[in-house]
Image (spheres, helix red, strand yellow):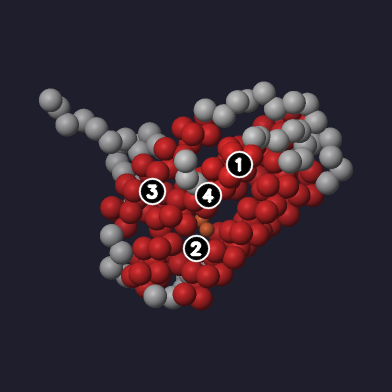
Amino acid sequence: MAKAKRKVSSGRDQAQDAIALLKADHRQVEEWFGQFEKARDADRKQKLATQICNALKVHATIEEEIFYPAFLEAVDDSDLHHEAIVEHNGAKKLIAEIEDSSPDDDYFDAKVTVLSEMIKHHVKEEEQPGGMFSEARGSDMDLDALGEQLATRKAELESEQDEEPEDVPPGGGRKSRGQEDRLMKGGR
Ligand SMILES: [Fe+2]
Ligand SMILES: [Fe+2]
């Protein structure tokens, strides 16, 4: 049997290392936040907000399950690590509010804008010199192996999200409790 296997979810032939994969996620949500800002139509806003929230939940989960623990073990900078976790927790609360809301809510746009600002700050902290990613680069972390683990887990979480029913009633409505718990914890 030919050993043509293992494609990362980006569809590239070559696997991305951990930092390249996480940065690509950052660029993707930044693009969607930019599109949200320009969107006028409620359906479009809803679609983008859902895409953003789903992508951020997957991203936070793979960082928390895989990248951050490996960072903490290799770099032993608990200040950077703990701040990142606290920022994730703040973002998750706002994501849950956005998911419970809809474009006809007066505060919907403000919630998405504030989420965008929180994420911009968090991404800067991760990517700036002396931040988590540059410290990880300078450490003995196996970024290629971690990249593969992140890609595998990301694909798994995305396929779980795809299985969710799309029929959200007009005016919002929420997912079943079980699904939300599962998503927020990133488990099954
Ligand atoms: Fe990140
Ligand atoms: Fe993060």
Q: Alpha carbon of mark 4 to alpha carbon of mark 1: how far?
A: 8 Å
Residue at 44% across, 75% down: 77
Residue on which disc 1 sits: 180
Q: Foreground residue, 30 or 159?
A: 159
Q: Secondary structure at mark 1?
A: helix
Seen in the picture, residue 186 relative to 161 is either above or below; the reply is below
Q: Picture coordinates of residue 185 (x, y %)?
A: 53, 49
- Distance from disc 2 to disc 1, alpha carbons, whole Å, reads 29 Å
Name the amino acid, label 3.
Answer: Leu
Q: Are marks 2 and 4 in contact (CB under 8 Å)?
A: no
Q: Residue 168: which quarter of the image?
A: top right
Disc number for residue 185 = 4
Q: CA distance from mark 3 to mark 1?
A: 21 Å
User: Disc 4 or 1, which lies upstream in sequence?
Assistant: 1
Residue annotated with mark 3? 150
In space, the residues marked 3 and 4 are separated at their CA atoms by 16 Å
Question: Mark 3 or mark 4, which has the lower sequence index?
Answer: 3
Earlier along the polypeptide chain: callout 2 or callout 4?
A: 2
Question: Residue at left 52%, top 52%?
Answer: 60
Query: What residue did someone put label 2 on?
Result: 127
Task: Report the amino acid beneath label 1.
Answer: Glu
Left or right side of 11 for 36: right
